[in-house]
Image (tube, grey):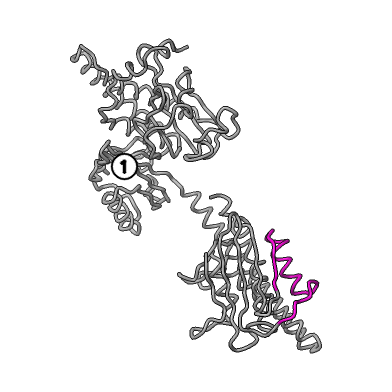
Amino acid sequence: MADHSGLGTDRGALLALYDLDAGGFRHLDEITAFASTLCDAPIALVSIVEEARQRFLARTGLDAEETPRDVSFCALAMLGDDIFVVPDACGDPRFADNALVTGPPHIRFYAGAPLIDSAGVPLGALCVIDTQPRADLTPIQRQGLTLLARQVMVELEGRRRDRDVIARQRQDAAAIADSDRMFRTLADTMPQMVWSTLPDGYHDYYNARWYEYTGVLAGSTDGEGWNDMFHPDDQERAWGRWRKSLETGEPYEIEYRLRHHSGDYRWTLGRALPIRDGAGTILRWIGTCTDIHEQKLMMEEREMIAHELSHRIKNIFSVIAGLIGLSARQHPEIGAVAEDLRDRILALGRAHDFVRPHSAESAPQVGQGQGLLWGILDQIFAPYNSRERSRIALSGDNVPIDDRSATPLALLFHELATNAAKYGALSVPDGRIALHIAREGTDVRIDWQELGGPAVQSMQPDGFGSRLITLSVERQLGGRIARDWSADGLKLSLWIPARSMSRSVGTE
């Protein structure tokens, strides 16, 4: 067990020995960047726990420089001998109400390796944080985090004011050499290809996995030689993306085809983050390459199958509409009903092809708002609007929709527009409709108001059109509806949960 007797000492005097206010934690910045990559966690911190706060000497993925001690996970992590793991903070009574869990950065998973000085006094922790629950770190991640925590202490101990300056310098030199050896050993054990560059982008380090994967000679891809490893069609794009990152300091991320030692080109995900000093100057770039070839092929296969299914569904809509038209010609007495039903089927077909096009030719063009409510409304209202005159005016928010909500929304607005054309504002030349959409809490509120039309009697609540509108809003979208048959025309308000409009809203 670690000796924690130092917890009762004057921590301010103890921490003053490390001259933490002087800054200059370049190596610690590199350690947190590497810890984040190693553990596949968006946040990594070197945290020093003081009397009233914890301060972050180095951080990756977090802007805050400190937080109060009473919400500190690291204050507990530093008391143990091993890595302290919280798989899901929301389900842990010690942290469920913690402000860092209920609010930014929304901690779910936490793993912290204690930082213990040479006298056995805990100073803080090197930790990684994820916004999603996780069972644990992998064995190699645990080993790596422990080694990196020791290296943090090597860096901090090297800063302690010691009378024997020469001895300290010698220890520092040895520690740096050990740190470099540990970094290279750890990088070589990672499944990803790891590389590093100077601030100007000159590649000067690759781990063993890079040379194993590509089969090239050591040093042959230093400098700008790396780009020759990409597929010729991807080289210009990769150079452009890398130059932009070097110019702006923005993270580098790109998918490209990398030449494998077999001679084949395989899809690879390349990522890099800048390592900065206290003044924000970039000191180095650290990047990884991950083989995603199999995942890419699976995605392409799924997309091909989805397009084929979409094409067949669109054909089914067309066949049903054709059968309805044929039946109407054979039985003229059902002509009016058949025409209404055919229009509804065609509206569903347009909605389906809008949110899930079966081909590039049928997909909405850029600017037509695929995946947004206004886009599908433009499709439904096209017969009532023209370039010269828009009789249905949209205003407010353009909210996201998906394939699940497209069908009931298409039926709903097709029915409203059809009724307005038969009995309401669109049945007279000067009539118009104002449609306003706004976010209201967790709902999307939609107000339909008909203006300039004839006086309309309220529709029967048990009529087919009314039942279809109610079915679409209440049963399929889980919303509610309010109607007002005023002298000015129908006023209708809808409240639909945003999560019913688009599944992606529930994950934000």
Is 404 one of the magenta-colored residues? no
Question: Residue 373 in the image: x percent, y percent?
Answer: 56, 66
Between 126 and 332, the residue placed more toward the observer is 126
Q: Position of residue 166 (x, y in %)?
A: 18, 14
Identify which residue, 280 or 394, lies in the foreground. Answer: 394
Residue 417 quadrant = bottom right
Q: Is residue 303 left or right of residue 464?
A: left
Q: Of all residues shown, which one is farthest toward the left?
A: 166
Which residue is more in the foreground, 7 or 284? 7
378 displayed left or right of 173: right
Would you name the residue on which mark 1 appears? 274
The relative height of residue 125 versus residue 231 in the rendered view (above or below) is above
Q: Is residue 135 visible?
A: no
Asked whether residue 477 is drawn in magenta, I would say yes
Q: Residues in magenta? A: 456-484
Query: In the visual, does 119 lie left or right of 478?
Result: left
Residue 2 point in image, percent of width and height: 45, 12
State whether residue 141 is above or below residue 233: above
Q: Is residue 364 visible?
A: yes
Give the amino acid at mark 1: Pro
- The total of numbered circles placed on residues is 1
Residue at (52% x, 27% y) in the render: 85
Closer to the camera in the image, 68 or 416: 68
Q: Residue at x 24, y 48 (%)?
A: 224
Secondary element under disc 1, as helix, strand or loop, is strand
316 left or right, relative to 303: right
Residue 284 location (% of width, % of height)? 27, 39
